[in-house]
Each structure stands twice: as C-alpha cells, then as structure tokens.
Amino acid sequence: MTTSALLRLDQVRVSFPGKGWRARPTEVLRGIDLAVDAGQTHGLVGESGSGKTTIGRAVLGLVPVAAGAIHLDGAPIHGLTPRRRRALSRDIQVIFQDPYTSLNPARPVGDTLAEPLYGQGQRPREARGRVAGLLERVGLPADAMHRLPREFSGGQRQRIAIARALAIAPRLIVCDEPVSALDLTTQRTVLDLLQEIQRDTGVAYLFISHDLAVVRHVSHVVSVIRHGEIVETGPAERVTAEPRHPYTRRLLLSAPVADPERQRLRREAYEREFAGERG
C-alpha cells in the first residue's frame, strides 16, 4: 500500500442491513485496500454487484464504513460530522453515471455550476466569470450557461457535469461509470477530455467502471473487484495485457471486439477458461 497516496483505503468494510427483523447484515466490502496517488487515475473495474460503486460512495461519505479507515492526504475522512464533510467537498467531487438525471432540469446550467462557487463565498459577477471559463474548458460556449439541460446532448451534459466537478478545484474526483450511458464516439471524446484536464490541473481520479477497455484507456493503476474483494491490482498495462487472476482474465476475454475472428477466438478462450476451472 502506498503510504504517500492522496487517497488511501485500509481494510475498509461496509455492510448493509438485511431484510426482515431476523436477517443478518450483508457484507458488501470485505477488507478493501486501495490507494490513489496525486495526479493519477486509479481504475476500479468489476461486474454489476461487485461492490465498486459502494467504494466510491464510501469515499464520498454516502455510506457508513463498518471497519477500516479512509484517509485523504493522511487525514481520516470517514465518520465526519456533516459540517466537516461539507468542508471536505472542496477536495473531493463526483461525476455520476447518468448525464440525463445528474443535472437539475429546471435550472439553467450556469446556476448549477455557480452554486458551489457561492458556497465558497464568491460574488455573482466573479462566479459568472468562473462559470464561463469552466464551460469553455470543457468545450462549450460561455453563453451555454443560460440554457437548460434538455437543450444539450448526452455528451454535452456530461461535459457540464465535469465542469461542475471542477468548479472548486478539487484534488480528487470520483468518476462513477461516467461514460457508460454514452455512445462509443462520445465516450472517447469525454475520456480524452478527462485526461487533458488531469494533465493541466493535476487532479486525481478514482475511475469506476464495468468496462475493462475503458479503464485501460484512462488509468495508471487498475484494481479488479469481485464479490466485495480486490482480487488483483497493478499497473494498467500489465493488468489488462497479462492478468494474473482468473476473474480478471474472464473480464478481458468476455469484452466484445469489433473483429468477428478475434471475437470467436476470445469466446473459445473464455470457454476454455471456464472448463479449466470446472475441471
């Protein structure tokens, strides 16, 4: 575990209440160790129900941690009072999966982007200038601030969500499936934008996705999660090219490719992987 990491999770456990008065709690995360270095992207990949989004929610303080510790720059960030959690929001922001529901449909996007700036004490004129700069930074015209979310495409809405996350210059952004609702061309554009912003600002990303190809494109380090446990962690190139855990190999082999022949070979390799484990 990197001791100098910007974000560090040490043996983090999260449990959800069971259903019914006799039901036992369900352990969703089982001793998670994970580190995100400053200015780097740590990709977290796994199938639905693996616990990857719960990790992001624990970092954001949206679910309680039953055991273990979460630190930002060496300071504990779980179990904080609401007031201290709001203060921490300057350092940690989030980009959600769905660009169609993550923006208030009744408010011009400029008002949405300005809200966190007002919370930091900026005056309206100063905030408007900052909003214009944010929109231009993500490739949208400054006058877009006067329009409603419904007037933008999905890719444009996600750009606005990125601008909102950047508004108060956080040190870490939790990206929770930020491109899964977009078409492939728009995905690439948004991923390139995130990487460009990282190069320019030094912001770190905890990038959560079910898609190993997407994670490989943006990450420096990749962790693979299954059933609430990290089964493999390493440099992105190594994990995605030479996976060591059978589950990581399954994810890689099951990822679709455009070439039918390569897809057939992958399918055969996938079936051999299963047969080997069953035997």
Image: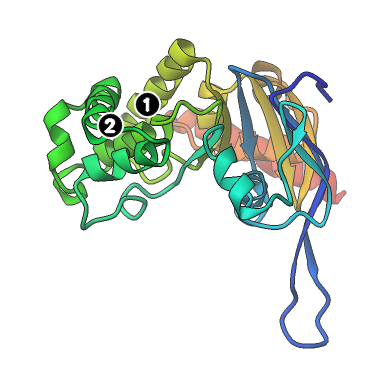
Q: In this figure, which residue is indicated by the disc labeled 1? A: 188
Identity, as a three-letter code, of the amino acid under mark 2: Ala
Q: On residue 13, which mark appears?
A: none
What secondary structure is found at the residue carrying circle 1?
helix
What secondary structure is found at the residue carrying circle 2?
helix
Q: How many marks?
A: 2
Q: Badge 2: how crowded within 10 Å, few (<14), some, or many (20+)?
A: many
Q: Considering only order in the chain, which callout, 2 or 1, is on the residue closer to the N terminus?
A: 2
Q: Quadrant of residue 45?
A: top right
Is residue 164 toward the left or the right of residue 130 in the image?
right
Looking at this view, is 3 or 129 the one in front? 129
Q: Quadrant of residue 114?
A: top left
* Rendered residue at 31%/30% (across/down): 185
- What sort of colour scheme is used for the picture? rainbow
* Rendered residue at 37%/51% (across/down): 102
Q: Residue 14's x, y, as percent?
A: 77, 56
Looking at this view, is 41 or 93 the one in front? 93
* Rendered residue at 42%/36% (across/down): 120
Q: Residue 53's x, y, as percent?
A: 60, 49
Identity, as a three-letter code, of the amino acid under mark 1: Arg
Looking at this view, is 35 or 259 the one in front? 35
Q: Badge 1: how crowded within 10 Å, few (<14), some, or many (20+)?
A: some
Is residue 49 toward the left or the right of residue 137 in the image?
right
Q: In this figure, which residue is indicated by the disc labeled 2? A: 127
Q: Residue 233's x, y, as percent?
A: 76, 28
Is residue 269 among what the camera can see? Answer: yes
Q: Residue 183's x, y, as percent?
A: 32, 39
